[in-house]
Image (cartoon, grey):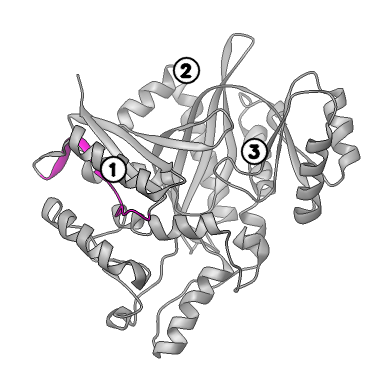
């Protein structure tokens, strides 16, 4: 939404601001030891207490910085979770106010197109052209008026999903299960079309597995594959968590359902698409969400449900498993929202008691670990639960 808004002064909704506050330490779990994680100084005390504990567990975590001591890294390169005019403006202001020379990513007009669902559609179209096993029926329809939406669902033999062109994590999705629109659906769809100029329609699939491929672009025309990420969504399609499994296990789970050749072909073709479309103008992570679905008792691959031009929970989970989980263990990564901070804090304390953390050779063997500080004001919680295999 910050990208669509375009304004450097964009103010996110209150729940997003709360999430930014509660989960601001998350990048520390994929950052390198010699990097720094920037947080709001209002959090410094609670984060410092949290960091003291983490540093006793893990010796190679990055440091944190705030407005108060950011001058110590005056020439550093800024690596944003997601690029938007608002985020760029924050660090431009810091440069100006503190007379610093932080290297800040520039905004490119192409980013508006690259972060929307239309880019994912065009990417999917290219995959369909080059890989015969990918069904052309997966291509979404983009509609710019309500009459067109009504005409499509009237003719459809299957339930459909309407998706806002700019949305993420299961937001902006409307399930259209009938061959007509009710009053509420018309209001929701009209609101999206008015605000975002179009809406995407696609068939509801009988999903069997959610996963993603994670890539890094260097901003100079090159991209590399980082790994696979297996995740879950709830019944409404919203992200609920990631599995902390080895790459070998995720690959085995996928190739039980689809061929390894198809998976490799998609990865190769995606690398080519990312290099030509993203990698020369964007430096950072890209996650391509995919799914295995069933039709007529056969399993198929949807290779490009959406493209996330940002660091994302899938990449975070990938790095968590690589860097923090013992080879004989596996687990799950959760993001949880509770309306009352005291309940969040209570759940955190109970989990610490019931699933005490155990490390072996500096890696997590089993137990519960909160990835961010939790206080009585917290409403969002990011955590992992790990157990030994076998």
Of callouts 3 and 2, which one flags the residue occurring earlier in the amino acid sequence? 3
Front residue of 200 and 187: 187
- The image quadrant that residue 33 belongs to is bottom left
| Side (left or right) of 98 relative to 363 | right
Query: Can you say which quadrant of the picture contains the C terminus?
Result: top left
Q: Secondary structure at mark 2?
A: loop
Distance in Å between CA atoms under marks 1 and 2:
37 Å
Relative to 147, residue 99 above or below: below
Query: Can you say which quadrant of the picture contains the N terminus?
Result: bottom right
Question: Residue 257 has which mark?
Answer: 2
Distance in Å between CA atoms under marks 3 and 2:
20 Å
| Side (left or right) of 320 relative to 227 | left
Q: Secondary structure at mark 1?
A: helix
Residue 284 appears in the rendering:
no
Residue 263: where, in percent of width, then height? 48, 29
Report which residue position mark 1 lands on. 348
């Amino acid at each position: 939404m910050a990208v669509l808004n375009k304004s450097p002064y964009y103010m996110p909704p209150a729940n997003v601001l709360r999430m930014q506050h509660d989960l601001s330490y998350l990048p520390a779990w994929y950052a390198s030891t010699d990097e720094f994680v920037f947080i709001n100084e209002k959090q410094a005390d609670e984060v410092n207490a949290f960091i003291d504990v983490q540093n006793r567990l893990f010796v190679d975590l990055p440091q944190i910085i705030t407005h108060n001591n950011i001058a110590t890294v005056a020439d550093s390169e800024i690596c944003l979770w997601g690029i938007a005019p608002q985020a760029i403006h924050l660090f431009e202001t810091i440069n100006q106010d503190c007379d610093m020379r932080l290297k800040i990513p520039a905004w490119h007009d192409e980013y508006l197109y690259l972060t929307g669902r239309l880019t994912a559609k065009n990417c999917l179209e290219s995959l369909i052209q080059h890989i015969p096993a990918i069904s052309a029926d997966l291509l979404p329809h983009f509609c710019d008026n309500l009459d067109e939406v009504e005409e499509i669902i009237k003719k459809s033999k299957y339930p459909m999903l309407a998706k806002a062109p700019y949305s993420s994590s299961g937001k902006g999705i409307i399930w259209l299960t009938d061959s007509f629109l009710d009053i509420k659906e018309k209001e929701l769809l009209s609101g999206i079309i008015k605000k975002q100029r179009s809406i995407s329609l696609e068939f509801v699939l009988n999903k069997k597995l959610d996963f993603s491929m994670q890539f890094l672009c260097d901003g100079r025309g090159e991209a590399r594959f980082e790994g696979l990420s297996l995740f879950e969504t709830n019944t409404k399609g919203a992200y609920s968590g990631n599995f902390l499994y080895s790459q070998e296990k995720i690959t085995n789970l996928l190739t039980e359902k689809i061929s390894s050749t198809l998976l490799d072909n998609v990865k190769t073709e995606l690398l080519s698409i990312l290099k030509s479309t993203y990698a020369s103008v964007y430096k950072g992570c890209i996650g391509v969400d995919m799914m295995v679905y069933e039709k007529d008792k056969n399993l198929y691959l949807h290779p490009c449900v959406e493209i996330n031009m940002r660091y994302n929970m899938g990449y975070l989970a990938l790095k968590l498993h690589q860097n923090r989980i013992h080879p004989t263990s596996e687990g799950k990564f959760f993001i949880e929202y509770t309306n009352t901070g005291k309940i969040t804090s209570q759940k955190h304390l109970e989990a610490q008691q019931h699933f005490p953390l155990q490390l072996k050779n500096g890696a997590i063997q089993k137990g519960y670990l909160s990835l961010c500080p939790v206080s009585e004001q917290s409403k969002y919680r990011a955590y992992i639960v790990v157990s030994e295999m076998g």
